[in-house]
Image: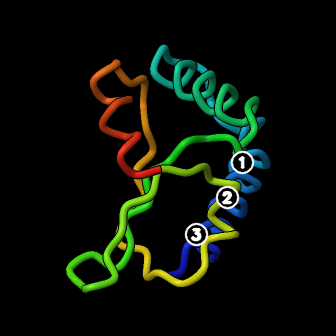
Amino acid sequence: MKPSDALVSLRLMRDKLGEALDEMPQETALEAMRHEACAALLGRSLDEVPVVLCADMGTDDERMVTTTVGALGGIVGGRLNSLVFQSTTSEVEEKALLRWQ
C-alpha cells in the first residue's frame, strides 16, 4: 500500500464512521464513551491529524516521516509498513519526532 492509498482508505473509514455514528448505542457508560470519542474524532479535520509514516522498512530506501494524514497523498513512492497515530506527546517525544520531519 502506498501512502496515497492509505489516505483514500482513511477517508473512506471516516465516512463510514460518520454514517454509523447516529446508530451507535449509548446505553452503557462504555458505549457512551465510545460514541463521544467517535464524535470528537469526526469533529476535527482528518487531514490535520499528525502521523509518523514508516515506509520501505528493511530496505535501502527505508524512511520515517512525520507528516499529517492530508499530506500522505503527496508522498511519492514508498511501500507503507506502518502508520503511527500520535497521542498526546511529551517534550521528549516531540524532540524525537522532529528527527523525521
Describe the element under mark 2 as helix, strand or loop.
helix
- Marks 1 and 2 sit apart, C-alpha to C-alpha, by 7 Å
Contact? badges 1 and 2 (CB < 8 Å): yes
Going by the image, does 40 lie left or right of 99?
Answer: right
Crowdedness of circle 2 by 10 Å Cα count: few (<14), some, many (20+)?
A: some
Q: Which mark is residue 47?
A: 1
Residue position marked by numbered label 2 in the rendering: 71
Q: From the top left corner, tell me how far across and down residue 93 is, in percent.
A: 31, 29
- Marks 3 and 1 sit apart, C-alpha to C-alpha, by 12 Å
Q: Nearer the viewer, residue 33 or 44?
A: 44
* Callout 1 amino acid: Asp
Residue position marked by numbered label 3 in the rendering: 6
* Callout 3 amino acid: Ala
Going by the image, does 52 lie left or right of 20?
Answer: left
Q: Which mark is residue 22?
A: none
Q: From the top left corner, tell me how far across and down residue 99 is, in percent.
A: 35, 46
In the picture, residue 85 is in which quadrant? top left
Query: Relative to residue 67, is residue 91 depicted above or below?
Result: above
Describe the element under mark 3 as helix, strand or loop.
helix
Say which label, 3 or 1, has the lower sequence index.
Answer: 3
Q: Nearer the viewer, residue 89 or 26?
A: 89
Q: What kind of colouring is applied to the model shown?
A: rainbow
